[in-house]
Amino acid sequence: MRYVTNLPYATKEEEHVTIPMSDGVRLSAHIWRPTSSDQEPVPAVLEYIPYRKRDLTAVRDSIHHPYLAGHGYACVRVDLRGTGDSEGVLRDEYLEREQADAEEVLAWLAEQPWCDGGTGMMGISWGAFAALQVAARRPPSLKAIAIASFTDDRHADDMHYMGGALLSDNLAEAGTMFAYGTCPPDPAVVGDRWREMWHERLENTEPWVLEWLRHQRRDDYWRHASVCEDYAAVRCPVLASSGWADGYSNAVTRLLGHLDVPRKGLIGPWSHKFPHLGEPGPAIGYLQELVRWWDHWLKGVDNGVMDGPMLRAWMQESVPPSTAYEERPGRWVGEPDWPSPHIRQVVHPLTRHTIEPPREPADLGGTPDGEALTVRSPLSVGQFAGKWASYNAPPDLPYDQREEDGGSLVFDTEPLTEQLEILGSPTVELDLSVSEPVAMVAARLSDVSPDGAATRVSYGILNLTRRDSTESPEPLEPGRRYRATIPLNGVAQAFPPGHRIRLSLSTSYWPLAWPPPKPTLLSVHEHSSTLTLPVRPVEEPDEVPASPFGEPEGTPPLATTQVTPPEERWEVKRDLVGYHAELDIVKDRGTVRFEHIGLEAGRRAQERYTAVADDFTSAGGESTWTMTFQRDDWDVRVVTHTRLRCDETDFFVDATLDAYEAGRRVFSRTWNEEVPRDLL
């Protein structure tokens, strides 16, 4: 990344500004703005997240907020209530109170003498969720949003559930927020009230995984803040981006296809990162794109930002399987609209271990009834699946799929005679039967090289009890034939000549997804089961320049010192005596000293997923976080631990929260709860 200091506007910053809410709670804001805005007001751009602006996001914030301020914007980073230096308690994600707070923040910004009355919202992940959800509420000052790595559907396409199956990230992300939501504010900012504010958080927080497990169907809990319930509610322009390695690769194209506002989509090869910090690379000059976006929609500059294709996407080339990549080779392609007129849905029948050449859908109905192909996957299928949403640290992408394929039902094409490219969401339609009333199918699409190595390209999961409805699931009748459609995650991928395309079906995918109560025998009927690929003809023009983006740039990051080293680990372990299997993940940032405030902060997260042999009720997950903050005589620590277990009928949550001051435990609470399994 190129760091720049010579910007069009001189800037100033205010590190702690309190914004009053209507119920008396005060939120803490960090504001960067042009010095000239005292005389010449500018638009304001809000990023609204719970991840501690004063320390834990301070380095990242220092790269992009001063950059945008230096181009003529008041950039405002607000801690959600109950986080960082804001008052109150954060009880769950995307609550009505959170969104009402955001509307009040925008109204406050629009009234400031340095703001011209126009506002925008930006962010990644939670910040993008917040911006999209608030846009659907139509606050009068909000003129446009720019969002990265988000969803419009909180149940069907988020880290909680996928195809009605429970994701392990439901536990992992609940553990993250259990830790962040119980950290104290900084006494250097809030003064002597810090301890009172901290204990209010400690006493009023419960593990979020409990509430998320209580809603295993698509109900009003998930419909709230799911913009897909009413796309027409969004009336402002939207710049939407994500990465193919992220868990949120699908929402960009859904917004492009359903919104009726000016909109642009951008999907790169990235994991869960801003595009200017994108990993795997290439990262792009995203902040320059934001300046053009805001200049047009907040300042009325006629700069052609809406020219060119609606969607710009990175067409990935074939690579060997790896758990991490520095760069993904490929090229940028553009689509004028979405759905794209360039892309054809090509249907391939499935026969005995073969993906047949394409046929027209009308030609499939008369195909004679085919043989039933069967699989009962071991619980070990999925240990090389990687994370639902890759962060690229520790290395967390799927590894070579050949071992996974050993416990799967596999279909291959013949070696390709010419390059084939897909862009969009593949789908699998199965004519199937199962042996148990609760069952799942995981479908994986892989690029198989001539030497046999299999790189996963996309995947999808379906809890078959939700094959017709996630609101009203029904148990399966063993032996009865059903039709089920499994959408795979969207992707842009080029398959070269000589390679094969592989579809793999399994009845477990642990620990990425929680297994059903019992092992299941899946029967798939050939001929009447199909794989549909969204084929983008190679001869179609790319519609974008070879290098449509500038080099990544931002302002210089804050100075920090690494006091203790970070640690990253991703280990798969198998005990062939007791048949115990374990995935152990460590993401330890070490201790970092933030020189501008003289604070040392540490974060260590550990996840562990275990199972024994093929006992599907032995599956269990744990999330442990340790957060430390130290300055002079201020020394605090929060340790959270959440464990999720199951039997055939229930989930069991055991959790602890311990808080320490100067090495002495000052708060401790334990939870032991049961949540019934609901056809899951």
Image (tube, rainbow, N blue to C red):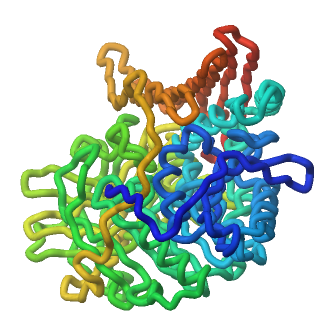
- The answer to whether residue 43 is left or right of residue 251 is right
In the foreground, 680 or 236: 236
Up-down relation of residue 579 to residue 2 (above or below): above
Residue furthest top as drawn = 664
Q: Is residue 373 visible?
A: no
Image-quadrant location for residue 423:
bottom left
Residue at x 77% of width, y 35% of height: 190
Q: Is residue 211 visible?
A: yes
Residue 337 position within the rendered picture, expressed as x and y whole percent measured from the top left:
44, 88
Up-down relation of residue 172 to residue 603 (above or below): below
Residue 198 position within the rendered picture, expressed as x and y whole percent measured from the top left:
77, 28
Residue 152 position within the rendered picture, expressed as x and y whole percent measured from the top left:
60, 66
Residue furthest right as drawn = 23
In the foreground, 49 or 510: 49
Q: In the rendered image, which quarter contains the N terminus?
A: bottom left
Residue at x 82% of width, y 47% of height: 26
Residue at x 50% of width, y 32% of height: 595
Q: In the rendered image, which quarter contains the C terminus?
A: top right
